[in-house]
Image (cartoon, rainbow, N blue to C red):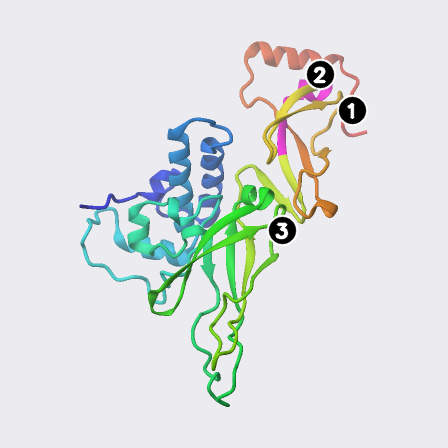
Amino acid sequence: MGVEYKDYYKLLGVERSASKEEIAKAFKKMARKYHPDLNPNDADAESKFKEVNEAYEVLKDEEKRRLYDQLGPNWQHGQNFQGAQGFNRANFSGGAGFDASGFSDFFDMIFGNAGAGGYQRTSGFGPDPFGNFSGRQRKGRDVEAQLTLSLEEAYKGGKKAITLQGQGGANKHLEVNVPAGIKDGAKIRLSGQGDSGMGGGPAGDLYLKVKLAEHPLFTVDGTNIIVELPLAPWEAVLGTKARVPTLDGEVELNIAPGTGSGRKLRLRGKGLGSAANRGDLYVRTQIRVPDNPTAEERELWERLAAVSTFNPRP
């Protein structure tokens, strides 16, 4: 059975000549539009969100994009093609909250399924070349690898299945207990899951270095998380109540009268880190203005400008 060609450029709404900056901007726009948190119980939006993530995972990476571009839009399943020189099919990690297990058959056929579980090898597993030098017992080498997590996975923690690819194509399936609130760059140690020992010696350890995937709504700053809250000018002046997304779901936030653009409102303990050193969620206000006001709106703004004593540049 054939595999359907995926036009990643079309999915993101960009030209094939688009720059990395244009691709990233398009991804953020599309990911926000179809994010499951903003489209609850909408299977079509969730499916579209996965497709957008898959497209961005390929087009943001120079080597993956080069290999994909070699196929061309007229590619048919079964046609022979050569991968980009030096391309490593096993070097993949999931992004934006989805791992490779959620990607299409088309993706798996080109890049393999090395990213299942959001896991990426960064150091080779294999025999220690010096293990038999003395004939004595020798502990296996420690190995470090990268574990890509969505922000939600890092915040809530819990068990996560990963697939480790060793030499010779053998897969090793492990279950990792991710501590709640784990930060970007932190390491998780799996005892005895590194390289095998020599001469009956113990196996080394596996260290998983956490990498947080990009998120369409939140920005991470150490243990703190930042989310933008757009406000209309009258909401900023008069005050309002606004629904704000958090990693625990939406909350209602009181916006005080006279709130300026760029002000940070803190929600304590809604960030990353351990219980004793939990970070906060900062809601950063952003005043938006209408792009094309109606004639009546423009007249009202002109009347306000005429009677107002406010001077933004004292």
4 or 235: nearer the eye? 4
Could one spot residue 59 in this view of the protein? Answer: no
Q: Residue at label 2?
A: 305
**Residue 153 position in % (x across, y down):** 54, 44
Q: Residue at label 3?
A: 183
Q: Are dots 1 and 3 in contact, CB under 8 Å?
A: no
In whole angstroms, how far apart are the C-alphas of marks 1 and 3? 43 Å
How packed mark 3 is, by other alpha carbons closer than 10 Å (few <14, some 14-19, many 20 or more), is many
What residue is rendered at 51% in x and 52% in y?
Answer: 148
Amino acid type at circle 3 is: Lys
**Residue 284 position in % (x across, y down):** 67, 34
Which numbered disc, 1 or 3, marks the residue that appears first in the sequence? 3
The quadrant where residue 104 appears: top left
Q: Nearer the viewer, mark 1 or mark 3?
A: 3
134 lies above or below 234? below
Tell me if residue 40 is in the magenta stretch.
no
Q: In the drawing, does residue 308 fall left or right of residue 82?
A: right
Tell me where the magenta segment starts and ends, as one range.
Answer: 228-239
Amino acid type at circle 2 is: Ala
**Residue 108 position in % (x across, y down):** 32, 51
Amino acid type at circle 1 is: Asn
**Residue 194 position in % (x across, y down):** 50, 68
Which numbered disc, 2 or 3, marks the residue that appears first in the sequence? 3
Tell me if residue 233 is in the magenta stretch.
yes
What SS does tag 3 mark? loop
Q: Nearer the viewer, mark 2 or mark 3?
A: 3
In whole angstroms, how far apart are the C-alphas of marks 2 and 3? 48 Å
> Residue placed farthest to the top in the image?
296
